[in-house]
Image (tube, grey):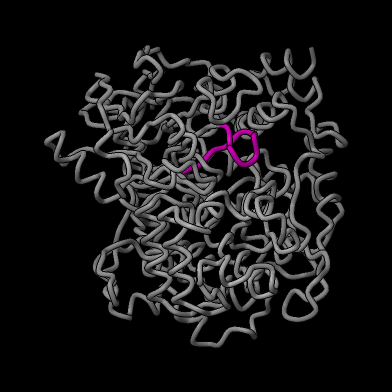
């Protein structure tokens, strides 16, 4: 089958047994790879209502068909599992090189169940599978683990997806990391991996991915290169030169980025504070070492920085926009050194920077309003803009000490633990909101609340870009269902094919599908592509519905949608009618509006969901 190696590993850590199955070609055709294919396998392999940390719980590492090919921007893979936060389906996506390396090792996907008696890692070596003792790696950070693995295997040409202390301590904010600083982070996948005592999956090999039409891939590459010099030049150059952090100042000024734990206004930050965390300013401030690009990416939006300040001397990646917002504007913090240090801590200890920064900002507002004493804060005077205190609390969380222990649950779990601060939460179904404000972009309110994988700005719908439109277009709550539904196609396809999300923004509109057709040989019509997107969305929803989750179980914090509204700034008076947006969306899908359950007809029309029909409409 073109675009796939054709093999799937299913490993059981309880007895270190495994089977290697042929890839289910029908599933690959219906769900592509990544998120979609991962959801289909998870639905099959994992019994309903299995706790996230149970031996029967399954975590999957899933590639897409363009991984390991010459298609530009095709370097991303997905980790799928049940989220310990939402108790529903979870997918987390990461770039770098791991996806292509997994295919080189001889596998399209790896699914892991069971719990090992002691720490272990799985070594995939050119089609062979080996379980190795990881006891001496347990507790080690990113760079320590990667160095130890390369030394033990005796080869630098390997790539590992692994967890750090965050996952080992079962933090709800724990990420699966690869390539030092790339993270499959949201929803706590690192905790699920850690619960199994699985330290890493290590890949090495020389397998090549068969493609249907290599000449066509080369032609699309050439066409994109021309597009990048012409119509797409501005976006390509902007991301290439300064990365996602290039838009930081602009997003703070319009209150798209979170300010003061979502309760502040742009005027509470100085021009210097806003500029300090832009890619332009950071690149020019002596940190820059070299550019960084994920596998087959011609843009290279990343950079490696060298930070030397006080007791810290390290190399890490340039903070992404989301990280800058989480440790910057959310905390009224304009101290770049402190943001770099917090970013480094999260990378080294394996944490989701979005949830981590959201948790710190929640705690900061609680403390500012007298909900915590200084003693309860372990003596850390965590006030707005206090850079040293921000670093101190970050270290406390990463090292799982003192108040950092309950904070490892994230802000919603911490609020329950301490039974206070609920009014200061900014979460959707318990997961911290990304740095694109739903009050600035009402379309994201629907996505944050009602996507089967909540609190994601990268999921389907009308997308992040909708928030930069005029108010007379944004704050309209009639006839939004069809455009919201239409927006699912690209996002679902990106998350399943192995492409970077920026491929849908910075390539010619048809390029991704041309690549897919050239790689797989599956020539898809517009109708088939629409069904693909809707089917991949539906399988994620079906997993949740089988778990007993209905529309009424999805939540979003009041302050996230402007209830009550801000009394100043660009978003003054804005309250988002997320329920009307939800009504419109489910009606457009042809689902039951009250429950968010797809009708039997909607499932039948998409095809490939007969198994879900039996469960949802017995």
Residue drawn at the location 61% of the way across and 33% of the way down = 89
Where residue 410 appears, x then y in whole percent? 58, 52
* Residue at the spot 71% in from the left edge and 64% down from the top edge: 424
**Is residue 230 something that shows in the picture?**
no
Where's residue 247, x and y in %? 51, 71
Query: Picture coordinates of residue 5 (x, y %)?
Result: 34, 22
Residue closer to the observer: 166 or 27: 166
Pinpoint residue 404: horizontal percent, then vertical percent: 50, 57
Could you say which is closer to the camera, residue 92 or residue 95?
A: 92
In this picture, residue 215 sits left or right of residue 204: right
Residue sitting at x 21%, y 29%: 205
The answer to whether 380 is drawn above or below residue 427 in the figure is below
The quarter holding residue 257 reads bottom right
Side (left or right) of 168 relative to 310: right
Which quadrant: the N terminus?
A: top left
Farthest residue, direction left: 154
- Residue 106, picture quadrant: top left
**Which quadrant holds the C terminus?**
top right
Q: Nearer the viewer, residue 149 or 310?
A: 310
Point 68% across, 14% down: residue: 610
Please give the range of residues in magenta: 82-93
Let me know if residue 88 is in the magenta part.
yes
Would you place residue 604 above or below residue 39 in this image? above
Q: How many marks?
A: 0
Residue 204 lies left or right of residue 282; in this view the side is: left
Residue 239 in view in this figure: yes
Does residue 168 sit above or below 517 in this rendering?
below
């Amino acid at each position: 089958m073109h675009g796939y190696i054709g093999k799937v590993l299913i490993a059981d850590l309880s007895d270190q047994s495994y089977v290697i199955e042929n890839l289910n070609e029908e599933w690959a055709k219906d769900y592509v790879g990544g998120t979609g294919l991962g959801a289909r396998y998870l639905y099959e392999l994992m019994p309903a209502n299995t706790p996230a940390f149970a031996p029967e719980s399954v975590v999957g590492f899933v590639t897409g068909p363009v991984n390991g090919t010459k298609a530009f921007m095709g370097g991303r893979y997905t980790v799928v599992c049940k989220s310990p936060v939402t108790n529903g389906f979870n997918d987390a996506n990461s770039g770098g090189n791991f996806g292509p390396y997994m295919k080189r090792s001889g596998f399209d996907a790896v699914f892991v169940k069971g719990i090992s008696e002691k720490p272990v890692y799985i070594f995939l070596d050119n089609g062979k599978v080996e379980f190795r003792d990881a006891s001496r790696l347990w507790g080690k950070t990113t760079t320590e683990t990667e160095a130890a693995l390369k030394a033990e295997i005796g080869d630098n040409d390997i790539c590992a997806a692994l967890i750090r202390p965050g996952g080992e301590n079962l933090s709800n904010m724990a990420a699966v990391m690869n390539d030092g600083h790339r993270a499959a982070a949201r929803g706590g996948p690192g905790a699920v991996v850690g619960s199994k005592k699985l330290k890493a999956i290590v890949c090495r090999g020389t397998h090549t991915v068969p493609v249907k039409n290599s000449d066509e891939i080369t032609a699309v590459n050439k066409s994109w290169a021309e597009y990048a010099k012409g119509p797409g030049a501005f976006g390509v150059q902007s991301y290439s030169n300064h990365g996602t952090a290039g838009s930081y100042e602009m997003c703070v000024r319009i209150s798209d980025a979170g300010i003061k734990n979502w309760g502040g206004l742009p005027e509470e930050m100085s021009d210097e504070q806003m500029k300090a965390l832009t890619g332009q300013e950071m690149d020019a401030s002596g940190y820059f070492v070299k550019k960084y690009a994920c596998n087959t990416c011609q843009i290279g939006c990343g950079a490696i920085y060298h930070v030397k300040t006080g007791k810290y001397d390290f190399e890490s990646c340039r903070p992404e926009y989301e990280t800058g917002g989480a440790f910057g504007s959310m905390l009224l913090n304009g101290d770049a050194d402190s943001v770099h240090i917090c970013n480094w801590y999260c990378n080294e200890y394996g944490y989701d920077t979005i949830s981590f920064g959201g948790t710190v900002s929640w705690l900061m507002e609680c403390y500012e309003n007298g909900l915590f004493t200084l003693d309860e804060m372990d003596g850390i005077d965590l006030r707005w803009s206090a850079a040293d205190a921000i670093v101190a609390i970050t270290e406390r969380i990463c090292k799982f000490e003192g108040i950092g222990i309950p904070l490892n649950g994230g802000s919603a779990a911490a609020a329950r633990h301490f039974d206070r601060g609920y009014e200061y939460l900014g979460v959707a179904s318990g997961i911290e909101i990304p740095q694109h404000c739903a009050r600035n972009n009402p379309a994201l309110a629907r996505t944050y609340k009602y996507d089967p994988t909540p609190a994601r700005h990268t999921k389907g719908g009308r997308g992040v870009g909708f928030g930069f439109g005029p108010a007379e277009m944004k704050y309209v709550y009639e006839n939004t269902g069809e455009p919201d539904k239409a927006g699912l196609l690209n996002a679902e396809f990106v998350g399943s094919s192995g492409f970077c999300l920026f491929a849908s923004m910075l390539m010619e509109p048809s390029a991704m599908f041309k690549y897919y057709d050239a790689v797989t040989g599956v020539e898809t019509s517009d109708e088939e592509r629409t069904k693909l997107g809707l089917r991949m969305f539906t399988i994620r929803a079906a997993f949740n519905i089988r778990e007993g989750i209905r529309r009424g179980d999805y939540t979003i914090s009041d302050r996230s949608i402007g209830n009550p509204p801000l009394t100043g700034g660009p978003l003054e008076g804005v309250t988002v009618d997320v329920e009307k947006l939800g009504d419109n969306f489910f009606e457009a899908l042809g689902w039951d509006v009250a429950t968010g359950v797809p009708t039997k007809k909607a499932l039948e029309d998409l095809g490939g969901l007969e198994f879900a029909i039996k469960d949802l409409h017995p």
